Image (cartoon, grey):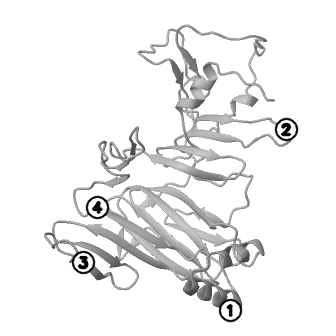
Amino acid sequence: MRGFRIGWIGLVMATLVVTGAWATTPDRTPAIHSNLLPFQLDLEPLVEHESVTLSVSGPGNFFYRESFAAGNPIGFAIQQDGEVLADGLYTWEAVVNPRLSSDVIRSLAQARAAGDDAVADRLRESGQLPAERQMESGSFRVVQGSILTDTGPEREPGTGAPSGGMTRVPSADVRVSSPDQVIPDDLIVQRSLCVGFDCVNNEDFGFDTIRLKENNLRIKFEDTSAGTFPSRDWQLTANDSTNGGANRFSIDDIDGGRTPFTIEAAAPTNSLYVESDGDIGLGTANPVVRLHLVDGDTPALRLQQDGSSGFQQQTWDVAGNETNFFVRDASNGSTLPFRIRPGAPSSA
């Protein structure tokens, strides 16, 4: 039986979150290679595909989506319709739509018509369908008509001052005059703790119990279990390390090369709120049903089948406002095949 002890470092780990800049970790082969240039984002698929769908969102409700057939260059220029994009942070996501044989396409269509979900599972097991959604994502910042592409100046370890372009050496490789301290017993800190290159003597902690203080903040959970014990490595990351990157808080699945959870800076209060009874609020701290969405204008739920599992792309919106509750066919001219007016009688 594996033993464990929760000390102050356990508290640190339990309070933080996020990973490596939406960049793919070395543990997973990426599906797409990305290259940021001063005026555009270029993508190169690394797997067989029928098409790649690229979407980009940014300031002022900017949203762009386009599908690129196999063999065509894939990219996004920051000049759209003759105008340069507004300054700010932009996030992108590229989804690979797999190349399928006519037999697989026919099998999927027949299975969908018959309501047989097991067919897709069998095709995945046999390797005829991707085992999982193949996609990559990232971010870039536009400043004065161009994309920030350099890493920018880092701070000299321990000084907080710019180092003129130096890349900070990971703490594990920093050589200091004093040896490491190994404490073969419990460590109890009865006041506050500061960890990082920029901690100073007489640090003013305020109400902080634990503080991490430097320019690259990461907490890694490296599980050394052997045999059949769970051993997945995870990481909590605060903010991208690249110049112009995203201000974000994420949880990284290090061994899987994924970032399943991210919160961007400036996300509204109560963007996600889970009550003690399990009710989930999106935009509200007072959800009254299992899932409660609140917005000032037409709260909506989007159901998007993106083509990454071999089925045809299709997007539906379910939404409501003061004029009607409706279902919108977003893939076919945003028609409204179903609407209910406020005040409609029961069982109308």
| Residue behind mark 2 | 226
Earlier-in-chain disc, 4 versus 1: 1
- Can residue 336 be seen at all in this image of the molecule? yes
Circle 1 crowding by C-alpha within 10 Å: few under 14, some 14–19, many from 20: few
**Dot 4: what SS?**
loop
In whole angstroms, how far apart are the C-alphas of marks 4 and 1?
39 Å
Residue 207 image label: none
Q: Quick check: marks 4 and 1 in contact, CB under 8 Å?
A: no
2 or 3: mark nearer the eye: 3
Q: Nearer the viewer, residue 101 or 279?
A: 279
| Residue behind mark 1 | 102
**Dot 3: what SS?**
strand
Q: Quick check: marks 3 and 4 in contact, CB under 8 Å?
A: no
Amino acid found under the numbered disc labelled 1:
Ser
In whole angstroms, how far apart are the C-alphas of marks 1 and 3?
37 Å
3 or 4: mark nearer the eye: 3
The answer to whether 252 appears left or right of 288 in the picture is right
The answer to whether 298 appears left or right of 240 in the picture is left
Earlier-in-chain disc, 3 versus 4: 4
Q: Quick check: marks 2 and 1 in contact, CB under 8 Å?
A: no
Amino acid found under the numbered disc labelled 3:
Arg
Q: Position of residue 84 (x, y in %)?
A: 37, 67
Q: Quick check: marks 4 and 2 in contact, CB under 8 Å?
A: no
At x 73% / y 75%, what residue is drawn?
Answer: 122
At x 42% / y 16%, what residue is drawn?
Answer: 207
